[in-house]
Amino acid sequence: MVVTIGVLALQGDFSLHLKVLSKLKVSGILVKKTTDFDLINGLIIPGGESTVMSLLIDKFNLYKKIKDFAIENCVYGTCAGAILVSSECDDKKINTLDLIKIKSLRNFYGRQINSFSKKISINFLKNKINASFIRAPKLKSLSKKIRF
């Protein structure tokens, strides 16, 4: 059986996630509508702007579909995606999916203006690489079963 991972493609960095899946030789598709869920075995919700993504999930009637999909399939959220899969968010404008018992604190490490890119050295690499430093959310466990 071929495993196909969907990448939610409403807003955010979905194209880079698809590119990484391709490099890993994992089948990946962009997910934009409810019928796309019939084609996938797992879902990645990428980073982006969590408020916008929350509104678009509601607008395209994907909220219930994602929650139902997550009952028997893996859903992975990065940055804004992690905010969306949480059970609580400090920003009440965000309709979380309540997939994992964590509380997300948006912009905990600063606002978007505090994000930056810089060339850095890593001791096991010959050349400097470009690194992005983003204003990530802070995630807090709401269950003794979840540890960071």
Image (cartoon, rainbow, N blue to C red):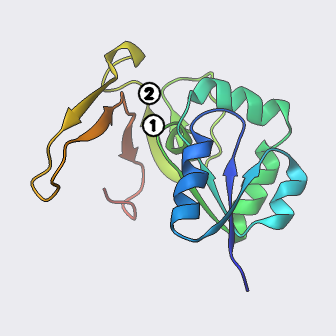
Please identify the quadrant where the N terminus is shown. bottom right
Taking the spot 60% from the left edge, 70% from the top edge, the residue there is 26
Residue 104's disc number: 1
Would residue 84 appear left or right of 147 to someone viewing this image? Answer: right
- Residue 120 location, x and y as percent? 18, 38
Question: CB of mark 1 within 8 Å of CB of mark 2?
Answer: yes
Q: Residue furthest bottom?
A: 1
- Asked if one can make out residue 99 in the rendered structure from this viewpoint, the answer is no
Q: Residue furthest right?
A: 35
Residue 135's disc number: none
Taking the spot 31% from the left edge, 56% from the top edge, the residue there is 148
Q: CA distance from mark 1 to mark 2?
A: 6 Å
- Residue 3 location, x and y as percent? 68, 76
Reading the image, the residue beneath label 2 is 106
Q: Nearer the viewer, residue 29 or 33?
A: 29
118 relative to 33, above or below: above
Taking the spot 17% from the left edge, 55% from the top edge, the residue there is 125
Q: Amino acid at mark 1?
A: Ser
